[in-house]
Image: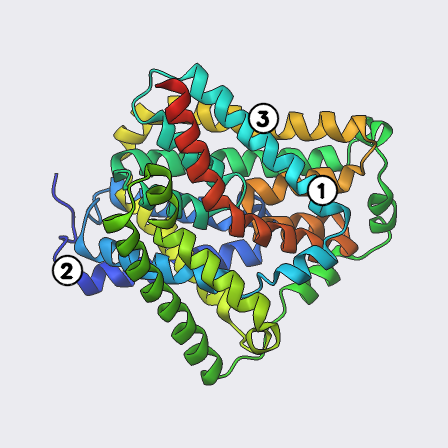
Amino acid sequence: MTSLIPETEIWPLLAIIVVGVAFCIYLEQTFKWAAKISGPVLALVVAMVFSNLRIVPTSAPIYDVVDDFFVPVAVPLLLFQANLRRVLRQTGPMFLTFHIAAMGSILGAFIAAWLFRHTHGIEEIVGIMTGSYIGGGVNFVAVAQTYKVPSELTNPLIVADNFIMAGFFLALLVMAGSRLFRRWYPHPHSAEGAADDSTVLAAQYWRRKEIALKDIAQALAIAITVVALSKWLSGMVKDQASSKLVVSLLGSPYVLITVFTTALVTVFPRMMEKIHGAEELGFYFLYLFFFVIGLRADLLAVIKNVPELFVICLIMAVTNLAFTLVVGRIFKLNLENLLLSVNATLGGAPSAAAMAISAGWNKLVLPGVLVAIWGYIIGTFVGIVVAEAVRNWLH
């Protein structure tokens, strides 16, 4: 079936994408119900409505522009805060609990891979979801593009991924306030947070930031240079390396982008901290990507493929949570650190900050954001390693 707007009409399609993203960001930052659903889920749903009502096509050249140019630049922009010294210094106990949750995602990947071992492309699927459930959407994209996974698989997978995340975020908030869980785990931050005004805290955290034209110019100059260098070096690795694991890792421009940006931020922290607006630009580019994924998602194909992919994502998320709570119970770790670490692995920095803010855990906002950024750093690498390990294990 043809769409109302044909795929050759670049400017009308681009207008729908940017207006749709603006609408979703407005909803997320204005209404509590929208914030709980999360912006990426809203972007997917709104975009799917447009494409499945045949207002816009499910494929168009402008969608490829978002994949090829905006997404790679988003990765370094989102890592402008990835100062390793700061992460190690200011995360405290959260650094430990984050890695427990990350191990839960890895364990869940192997369980899902074994249960669905006859599913075509299961190695790439669990690798992508390991990257996503340690880092976030940026790692999902990085691992998927490393293996050149077709959109017929990534589109329904990211739909399943985001709906699982949205449900888990609500469950984690319920668990944080549950008397049962508070009886089983120490919860010092919940006691303190009860007296805090989370509305004031949220307004302070999401306040407008000073930004100049120079900030935008510097942020994009650094990000695009890092992407260009990484793509050039990854091409050389692919041409000369013989090891499949080396090609998968160092032949991935996203791994090199992560390494170069993290090194730059760690070696020159003061210079990078002076550049404002990089995180906002990075997240905006990611929202464009999520909206485009929704436009590409044919509802019939999603319904056909999501049940299996939904179960894979669910297994990994449940294993993450269960493993984290069991280990946390054994070692008597704080409930808030455990739940916020699960949130950080499943959803990344924005959702970790939102959960800490809404729960009134003001002392955990910064540690939660920092460990989530650490997840961005390691997520792509771990996702590729898991994909290769599963491939060797099953074959």
What residue is shown with label 3? Answer: 318
The amino acid type found where label 1 is placed reads: Leu
User: In the picture shown, does residue 234 fall above or below 159?
Assistant: below
What residue is shown with label 1? Answer: 96
Q: CA distance from mark 3 to mark 1?
A: 19 Å
Secondary element under disc 3, as helix, strand or loop, is helix
Q: Earlier in the sequence, mark 3 or mark 1?
A: 1
Q: Residue at x 34, y 61 (%)?
A: 70
Closer to the observer: label 2 or label 3? 3
- Whether residue 283 can be seen here: no
Closer to the observer: label 3 or label 1? 1
What residue is shown with label 2? Answer: 9
User: In the picture shown, does residue 66 fall above or below 103?
Assistant: below
Q: Residue 353 at x, y = what percent?
A: 64, 53
Q: Residue 233 at x, y = what percent?
A: 32, 59
Tell me if label 2 and label 1 are in contact, CB under 8 Å. Answer: no
Q: CA distance from mark 2 to mark 3?
A: 43 Å
